[in-house]
Amino acid sequence: MQMSSKAGRRAFLLFGFMFLIYSLLISFATISTGNFYVGHEAVFIGTTIMCFCLSYLYPQFKENDERTKRIKERGMFFSYFFILGYMLILITLFQFEGFMLDGYQTVSLLAALSMSTVFVSFVVLSKRY
């Protein structure tokens, strides 16, 4: 049994607002303790962006037709190059000591950027195709 288009959108929208509240609370807590950017804040923000994008895309992706497959295919293709660019920038900043992050922070940042890039590219390409 599939959800209706409105129910699916509402569910993703609800989860998006829930993750937005969580990410604001966690960010505020880490800022107030003086430990800002532990790493998981970025993952929550990335998940928030993903939920809002899926809320927008749900009616289109529910069909799973040729257009949807093309959007997903092209979105992953473009995201691959953006993610490589993020890695190149991070490597350069680490090499020249632009900033220092530990392993958990770096992986969290890359995960958040990857999630955000993939789903925002889906939204952009859904407007194009």
Image: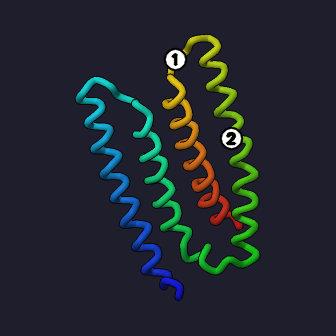
Of residues 102 and 116, which is closer to you in this image?
A: 102
The residue located at (58%, 56%) in the rendering is 119
Q: Is disc 2 in contact with disc 1, using a CB cutoff of under 8 Å?
A: no
Left or right of 44 on screen, residue 26: left
**Quarter occupied by the C terminus:** bottom right
- Distance, label 2 to label 1, CA atoms, is 20 Å
Task: Residue lying at the far bottom in this picture: please name it.
Answer: 1
Q: What residue is disc 2 on?
A: 82
The residue located at (64%, 65%) in the rendering is 126
> In the rendering, at what x and y percent does residue 51 appear?
47, 60
Task: Residue lying at the far left in this picture: please name it.
Answer: 32
Mark 2 Cα shell of 10 Å, populated few (<14), some (14-19), many (≥20): some
The residue located at (64%, 14%) in the rendering is 95
Quadrant of res 110: top right
- Give whichever of discs 2 and 1 has the lower sequence position: 2
Task: Residue lying at the far front in this picture: please name it.
Answer: 103
Q: Amino acid at mark 2?
A: Phe
- Marking on residue 99: 1
Image vertical order of residue 94 relative to residue 66, above or below: above
- Marking on residue 116: none
Q: Nearer the viewer, mark 2 or mark 1?
A: 1
The residue located at (56%, 35%) in the rendering is 107
